[in-house]
Amino acid sequence: VLGCGKIGSVMAKDFTRTIEGSRVTTADISEERARRSASEIKGADWTTIDTTDHPALVETLRGFDLALGALPGDYGYKTLEASVEAGVDIVDISFTPEDPLQLDGAAKKAGVTMIPDCGVAPGLSNILVGHSASRLDKVRAVHIMVGGIPETPIPPLGYTITWSAEGLIDEYVRDVRIIENGRTVEVPALSGLEEIEFPGVGTLEAFYTDGLRSLAQSLPNVESMWEKTLRYPGHVEKISLLRELGFF
């Protein structure tokens, strides 16, 4: 398991619980995090990794049957490249700025199964859309709304971080690909703001984020397709202010 943060450490524990006979090694640039994550799993090993040292990363991966990538987006693509070179299958949740499909040809040539963008959204959202599309004669529009929010707003942003801070900030600054009138266009992050009423939850605000990923290519002839992230009202205004002040 590459990355022992909030999500990676849980992935490691969940994997050993659900895959009988599995043996896990936790890996992180921080020895402390790798050790701590391994200590929570019976029989687990640990090691340190540095994604900037490509040869060493490839050599580390070669000793395994499967890699699970849970690094921040800026480092995730490097682990995908390394897994292809090492000939090791990988499932990755990193929100990379690069398009993982660029590695499709190399992965096929190496006989490597690579499942990128396999988090909640992108990831579970793509699977749900794909399943729904398979049951329909034709798909005209795909609209995804998703957001991991606390049960009640937590000041000052009405939010609490459940994954990497780097990935969260990327959502707020990265240009967004959507499909309008059958054509792929780019729009600014945080745009398309609207309020949605959810029974039992109340009013939430929704805004464009770059979560379509492979869906934009895998479902042809769709007239409209977008993903919007959900937050409590007022979140976008506060995040926009922080961005304008140069905090990110």
Image: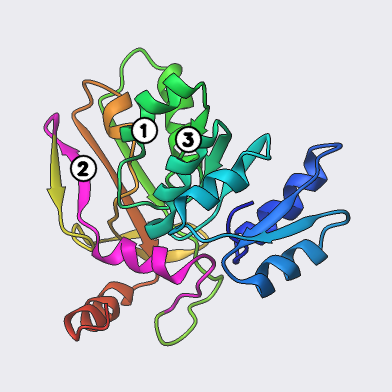
- Residue 102 versus residue 187 in the image, above or below: above
Name the residue rendered at 48%, 35% in the picture: 85
For the residues marked 2 and 3, what is the alpha-carbon distance in whole angstroms? 32 Å
Q: Can you give x and y, in whole percent of width and height, for residue 88 in the image? A: 58, 33
* Residue identifier under label 3: 85
| Disc 1 versus disc 2: nearer the observer | 1
Label at residue 103: 1
Outermost residue on the top side: it is: 137
**Quadrant in the picture for residue 188:** bottom left
- Cβ–Cβ below 8 Å for labels 1 and 2? no
* Residue identifier under label 2: 178
**Which residue is at the front of the view, 111 or 148?**
111
For the residues marked 1 and 2, what is the alpha-carbon distance in whole angstroms? 22 Å
For the residues marked 1 and 3, what is the alpha-carbon distance in whole angstroms? 11 Å
Colouring style: rainbow
Query: What quarter of the picture does the C terminus occupy?
Result: bottom left
Q: Which residues are magenta?
A: 158-183
Labels 1 and 3: the sequence-earlier one: 3
Q: Is residue 166 magenta?
A: yes
**Which residue is at the front of the view, 97 or 222?**
97
Q: Left or right: where does residue 118 sit relative to residue 184?
A: right
Q: Can you give x and y, in whole percent of width and height, for residue 146 in the image? A: 42, 52
* Amino acid type of the residue tagged 3 in the rendering: Glu
- Label 1: few (<14), some (14–19) or many (≥20) C-alpha neighbours in 10 Å: some
- Residue 77 versus residue 163 in the image, above or below: above
| Disc 1 versus disc 3: nearer the observer | 3
Labels 1 and 2: the sequence-earlier one: 1
- Label 3: few (<14), some (14–19) or many (≥20) C-alpha neighbours in 10 Å: many
